[in-house]
Amino acid sequence: MSETFWQRLDKAARSITPFGLTLFLVILSVVPMRIPGYAEIAPVLALMAVYHWAIYRPNLMPLWSIFVLGVLQDLLSGVPLGLYIIVFLTVYGVVLSQRRFFAGRSFLLYWLGFGIMAFCAAVESWFLASLWHLSLLNFETVFFQFLLSMGIFPFVAWVFLRWQQALLGPDQDVS
Amino acid sequence: MEQRPSALLRLAAPLRSLVQRFMYLGLIAAAFGLMLVGKIDALLIDRMRAEVTNAVAPIVTALSQPLATISEAIVAVKSLSTIREENIRLAQENANLKQWLLVARKLQAENIALQTLLSSVDDRKPRYITARVVAGTRGAFANSFVINAGSGDNVRKGQAVLNDQGFVGRVSVVAKHSARVLLANDINSRVPIIIENTRTRGILAGSNTNRPKLIHLPPNARVTTSERVVTSGHGGVFPPGLPVGVVASINDGGVEVKLFADYHKMEFVRVADYGLSGFVDTSAVTPSAGGKAEKRR
């Protein structure tokens, strides 16, 4: 296939957008919202992106990019370094291995899948953070954070689905 | 190339998945390694955190501007409906405060007179640095803010951070143009306090919830709800007398304090430079650590 330079540039620019969007969500999650009660249970927005792209375009979100996003999330949000790297990598790994179950099904199932993954991620992050601080942290906050993530997910997912339809074209890497 | 997989590619596919699996496990191990490094050398991670935050701070500031405008607009619309009640309440409060002003003036004059009589040593007057809160994380894992003033603006590690309501936290990590503030309810936060009326000493320990707890109170201490808690100044980290909060509840779990500072509304904070060195002088912990720090730069 002979592509011109501009076509290749265009393709490259499109294919880094999943990473770019996720990076944007990492940064957005530390912006103070000033809504009463929101900050304590602000969802980990990047987790939604990791889940989504692991299902639909894992080839555009390689492992190392998940690692980089985790590092940034940890450094910016002030949690122990390594916490969200491990959480993101686990979610990515599990979703990738169960991709057949998630991909191409109904939106409801896709949402349910996120619910399961987000809950596991919540428990995992709570466990890791408790281990780090050597004291049991408040699980209630983590649980409400999970519930809010579930509520926000359809909106973020809708944006992602539209984005990939408009910019990324059909998936070439269906396994 | 995708249309006709060659023999080489067919051979390479399992190899690739093997490499991927190794990479996956390797990255997870690396993440655990980083966690361990953070536990061993917290200063190194702090410096990394500071630099990354410093780099991202302008983007976050730009993003926070429209969000602040939106939330201000929402508040403005909301307050319109209660504007009459608010006006009446403020008028009453104003009348109340005017009386307090008279009392305060009288007490201030008396205080100055008594202090000159005793020739007591004055507490140092602080220099304030006002900064905007540009980023923040709250929740079960961490409670901190990022402010847009750093070492270039004379912000130093350990300084007390206040707002108009009271004590907010302390500066934990400083970069050139940004700093991280550890909030008083963070699990790593310990603030020496004193209960204003009974002069009972204690430590305010954060627990990553909205209500930090009082620990190390004397065994026979009598604490009642709605008593004011202020910084004690012990240890020389924070100046004495900064309002922290009120005792909210006393139960078997301990004494919980409701902080005066309202974290979700916070837009600007003041970093108070009292010229206190603090009891942990990180530059003098070990000479070797200092040497290493120099080499890293």
Image: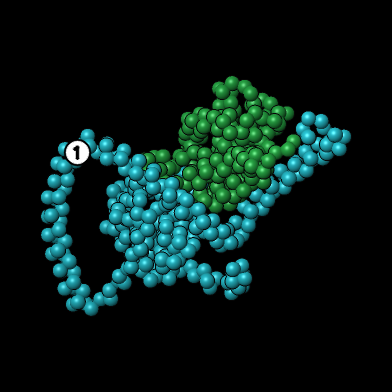
Chain colours: A green, B cyan
- Amino acid tagged 1: Ile
Residue at image point 76% right, 44% down: B22
Q: Secondary structure at mark 1?
A: helix
Report x, y in % for residue A88.
61, 41
Q: Quadrant of the N terminus of chain B?
A: top right
Report x, y in % for residue B144.
45, 52
Residue at image point 41% right, 61% down: B149
Quarter residue B79 falls in: top left
Residue at image point 35% right, 54% down: B268
Query: In the displayed structure, does residue B5 sit left or right of residue B28?
Result: right
Report x, y in % for residue B159.
41, 64
Residue at image point 68% right, 34% down: A96
User: As displayed, is residue B107 above or below residue A1?
Assistant: below
Q: Which sits in the foreground, B72 or B255?
A: B72
Q: Which sits in the foreground, B115 or A143?
A: A143
Q: Which sits in the foreground, B167 or A115?
A: A115
Does residue A166 appear anywhere in the picture? yes
Query: In the displayed structure, does residue B145 sit left or right of residue A12?
Result: left
Letter of the chain that mark 1 sits on in the rendering: B
User: As displayed, is residue B222 above or below residue B109?
Assistant: above
Q: How many marks?
A: 1
Q: Quadrant of the C terminus of chain B?
A: bottom right
User: Which residue, given by chain and number where applicable, does mark 1 sit on?
Assistant: B83
Query: In the displayed structure, does residue B127 sit left or right of residue B10?
Result: left
Does residue A134 appear anywhere in the picture? no
Quarter residue A98 falls in: top right
Report x, y in % for residue A2.
73, 38
